[in-house]
Image (cartoon, grey):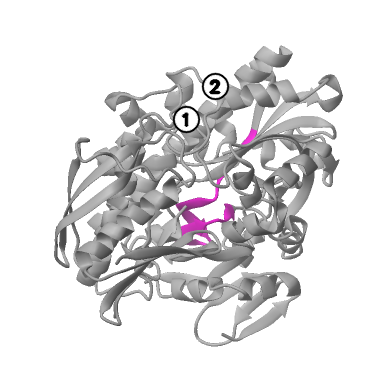
């Protein structure tokens, strides 16, 4: 595949196929090391594709779409593909600002320890919130509004600082199978495994005082970053509907080069069913992060006497989702898989407090490295379908990371830097070692130079609870 | 003699399976999933209660994906790893199996689902080989 370098950080295919990648000269070579460019090329086969399929600088090989892939299809008859969202529907990140200064806390260890007792991690571990049938229905339909207003697990003000107010009105609980509900019934308030985490951090550096002030962030403040999604419920929704679309595609005369890209017109019965189920799973994921927010408030209350009102939600944003958006005047279905929405100051969807500065975006680094707070720009619509990266991006398989890194040694190194770590095993810790990921500073530098986001703050970890 | 191996994939795991028959290929894939999920190789006694499984799909590849996803679903909701797997009847469209599991609350690797990406089932030197990517 021939790529032409349009600018310092934008590459694009030269032929009829329409692929654009945001990367610098180092990241583009890393991207070429796996099959992500071929996967991005496959995405251009989706019927109704608008413009180019776009790869983020943290892009790596996945299945169907690459992780870090973005594509928009024309609504209502363009395609929707579960492979463009992934199994972990509405995997995303939420940042909490505690208002506490690092200097106000003698030691972080008791807080991290208490968080590890309050937040179940790993596979199949249920939480304290167990939903019966009607409660599950309300979570799927109402999302965070139900969790906060009816269950009392949060503050009403939280809703304004969650993408789509934590509740997609297109959610259709009837399209969510009994199996998906069964998998999710005890999973609210749980992290799950893999690369999910809950991190206690300190704001180390502010790059944009105006935006930081709007976001309520100040140097030295303690923040908490939560990374998780819709757990088994979302996984099952994806499995159920990929199967349906795999069987339905021939009826719509669609063929794709990868069966995991199975798709149908959004306006078709199968397309509407998947979109409704995906929105319901997204509501479940936002509810999950809301319950976790409540647990964080409880823990800070118990351990340092902090009133729950002092911990505010800075923002919550998905990075595995499809949304109906208006991009450059056209109504489109934007698939973001491992990519974050990046709305600029002109977006009416942002809370009034952020309309001067743009949408907050959170880019977690790898374990033990810095994370970034960015702000979206209006220019991102034209450059990247109003999208940006979602993390550092995996560069090494889990097995290779375990061979390259001794988990016990990594734990010692993190602890020597004053980072309290809670992880089920040293082997799992090694899987998420910094060497397994690309350089987050470089990834962030690319999206800033491409003009799709502005740097606001840099956060460094002091406590990590690994899923 | 059936066997399996796991190959590296940037974010996920590729499972390769080889067997003399289609039924043994699918049974070995089920046992491989258990081995990926848990270090515990314990096989429950033949007297332990079993579960009857029926899976249907539109073709052989789809059947393998659905079979893996059936085991993932049962493992997560019943907190079990199915180390004893017997496939009693199989065609390109339907599978009947009997499975028995061991209790597992904490697993080594959480498997979210099986994918259709780069899915292959081929004849190879008189045996059958399969390759499937699992989202972990």
User: Is residue A335 one of those drawn in magenta?
Assistant: yes
User: Is residue A1 one of those drawn in magenta?
Assistant: no
Name above or below for residue A252 compared with residue A444: below
> In percent of the image, x 24 and y 74: which residue is there?
A253
Secondary structure beneath dot 1 equals helix
Q: Crowdedness of circle 1 by 10 Å Cα count: few (<14), some, many (20+)? A: many
Name above or below for residue B84 compared with residue B117: above
The location of residue A441, given as percent across then percent down, is 77, 56
Earlier along the polypeptide chain: callout 2 or callout 1? 1
Q: Which residue is mark 2?
A: A154
Q: Crowdedness of circle 2 by 10 Å Cα count: few (<14), some, many (20+)? A: many
Quarter where residue B118 is shown: bottom left
The location of residue B130, given as percent across then percent down, is 33, 70
Disc 2 and disc 1 in contact, CB within 8 angstroms: yes
Q: Which residue is mark 1?
A: A144
Name above or below for residue A426 compared with residue A322: above
* Count of numbered marks: 2
Name above or below for residue A90 compared with residue A125: below
Magenta residues span A314-340
Secondary structure beneath dot 2 equals loop
Observer-nearest of A269 and A392: A392
Is residue A328 visible to the viewer in this orientation of the structure? no
> In percent of the image, x 31 and y 65: which residue is there?
B2
Going by the image, does A179 lie left or right of A36?
left
Is residue B86 visible to the viewer in this orientation of the structure? yes
The overriding secondary structure of the stretch rendered in magenta is strand
């Amino acid at each position: 595949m021939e790529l032409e370098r349009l600018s310092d950080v934008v590459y694009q295919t030269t032929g009829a196929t329409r692929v654009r990648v945001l990367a610098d000269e180092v990241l583009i070579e890393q991207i070429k090391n796996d099959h992500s460019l071929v996967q991005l090329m496959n995405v251009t086969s989706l019927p109704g594709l608008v413009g180019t399929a776009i790869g983020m600088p943290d892009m790596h090989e996945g299945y169907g779409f690459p992780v870090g892939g973005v594509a928009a299809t024309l609504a209502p008859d363009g395609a929707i593909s579960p492979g463009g969202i992934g199994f972990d529907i509405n995997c995303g990140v939420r940042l909490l600002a505690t208002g506490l200064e690092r200097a106000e806390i003698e030691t972080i260890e008791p807080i991290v320890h208490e968080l590890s007792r309050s937040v179940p991690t790993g596979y199949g571990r249920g939480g304290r919130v167990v939903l019966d049938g009607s409660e599950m229905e309300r979570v799927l339909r109402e999302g965070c509004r139900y969790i906060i207003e009816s269950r009392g697990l949060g503050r009403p003000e939280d809703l304004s600082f969650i993408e789509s107010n934590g509740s997609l009105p297109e959610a259709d609980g009837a399209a969510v199978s009994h199996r998906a509900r069964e998998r999710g019934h005890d999973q609210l308030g749980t992290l799950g495994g893999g690369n999910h985490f809950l991190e206690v951090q300190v704001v180390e550096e502010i790059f944009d005082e105006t935006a930081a002030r709007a976001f309520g962030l100040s140097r030295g403040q303690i923040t908490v970053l939560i990374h998780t999604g819709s757990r088994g419920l979302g996984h099952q929704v994806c499995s159920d509907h990929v199967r349906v679309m795999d069987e339905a595609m021939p009826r719509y005369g669609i063929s794709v080069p990868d069966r995991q890209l199975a798709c149908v017109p959004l306006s078709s019965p199968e397309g509407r069913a998947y979109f409704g189920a995906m929105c319901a799973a997204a509501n479940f994921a936002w509810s999950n992060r809301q319950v976790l927010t409540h647990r964080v408030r409880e823990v800070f209350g118990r351990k340092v006497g902090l009133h729950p009102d002092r911990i505010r939600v800075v923002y919550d944003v998905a990075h595995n989702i499809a949304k109906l958006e208006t991009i450059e005047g056209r109504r489109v279905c934007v698939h973001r898989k491992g990519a974050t929405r990046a709305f600029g100051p002109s977006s009416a969807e942002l809370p009034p407090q952020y309309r001067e500065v743009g949408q907050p975006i959170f880019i977690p680094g790898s374990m033990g490295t810095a994370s970034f707070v960015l702000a979206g720009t209006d220019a991102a619509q034209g450059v990247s379908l109003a999208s940006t990266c979602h993390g550092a991006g995996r560069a090494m398989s889990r097995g290779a990371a375990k061979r390259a890194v001794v988990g016990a040694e990594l734990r010692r190194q993190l602890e020597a830097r004053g980072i309290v770590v809670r992880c089920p095993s040293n082997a799992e810790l090694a899987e998420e070692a910094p060497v397994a990921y690309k350089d987050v500073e470089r990834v962030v530098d690319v999206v800033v130079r491409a003009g799709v986001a502005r740097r606001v703050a840099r956060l460094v970890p002091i406590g990590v609870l690994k899923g | 003699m059936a066997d399996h191996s796991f190959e590296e994939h940037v974010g996920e795991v590729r499972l390769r399976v080889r067997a003399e028959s289609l039924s043994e290929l699918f049974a070995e894939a089920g046992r491989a999933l258990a081995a990926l999920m848990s270090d515990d190789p314990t096989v429950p006694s033949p007297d332990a209660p079993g579960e009857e499984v029926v899976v249907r799909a539109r073709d052989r590849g789809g059947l393998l994906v659905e079979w893996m996803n059936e085991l993932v679903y049962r493992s997560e909701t019943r907190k079990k790893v199915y180390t004893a797997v017997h496939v009693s009847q199989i065609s390109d469209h339907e599978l009947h199996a009997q499975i028995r599991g061991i209790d597992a609350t904490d697993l080594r690797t959480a498997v979210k689902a099986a994918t259709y990406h780069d899915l292959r089932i081929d004849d190879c030197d008189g045996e059958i080989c399969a390759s499937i990517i699992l989202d972990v």
